[in-house]
Image (cartoon, rainbow, N blue to C red):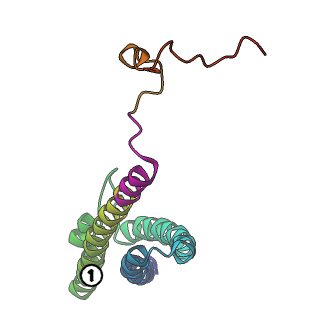
Amino acid sequence: MSFQGLLIALNSLIDIHDELLQLARDKVTIVVQNDVDALMALTAKETRLIARLEDSFREMGSSAAGSWKEIGLTARPGSRLSDLIQAVPRADHKTELRALAVKLKERHNELKVINERNQLLIQQSLELIRYELDLIAGPSEQEITYAPTLAGQGYVGGASRRSFDTRA
């Protein structure tokens, strides 16, 4: 029964990765269109999917531990799914597990690439916003304090102009 639970958990992980991939692809369009509201809604969906992903991952871990017991072995600390696949005695189970593991790995790698691309796209978008703000506000490196070289450039026609009228 643990073997079937493991298959169910792996299929669930693959389905969640497929949903995350679709969201990652949608995020590209949303970021390019600069639709902040849609980005926030998409991020909320991602958060829910990640919670489901963590649950499925825990389920897979407990099913894998049960599968180790089912075949009469104990899992070593740090053992991986590939170790379990090698230890499974039935060839059909081994083939099925290997196919699901490869499918999951492919989805994971594709998601990683798209997320890295999205991260770069968001970073470039932020750099563009900073550049536009600098154009609007002017360079922030101008000194606002007293500069002695400008002190002598006052009123040229006689005494320099005072900024405070003492007669008032």
Would you identify the image quadrant in which residue 89 lies?
A: bottom left
- Identify the secondary structure beneath mark 1: helix
Residue positioned 41% across, 76% down in the render: 27
Q: Position of residue 145 (x, y in %)?
A: 48, 21
Is residue 89 shown to the viewer in this render?
A: no
Residue positioned 35% across, 60% down in the render: 128
137 within the magenta span: yes
Q: Is residue 18 above or below residue 167?
A: below
The tally of labels here is 1
Q: Is residue 93 above or below residue 54?
A: below
Amino acid bearing label 1? Lys
Along the line of sight, which residue is nearer the eye, 65 or 138? 138
Q: Which residues are magenta?
A: 128-141
Q: Residues within 10 Å of mark 1 (few under 14, many from 20)?
A: some
Q: Position of residue 48 (x, y in %)?
A: 57, 72
Would you identify the image quadrant in which residue 85 lies?
A: bottom left
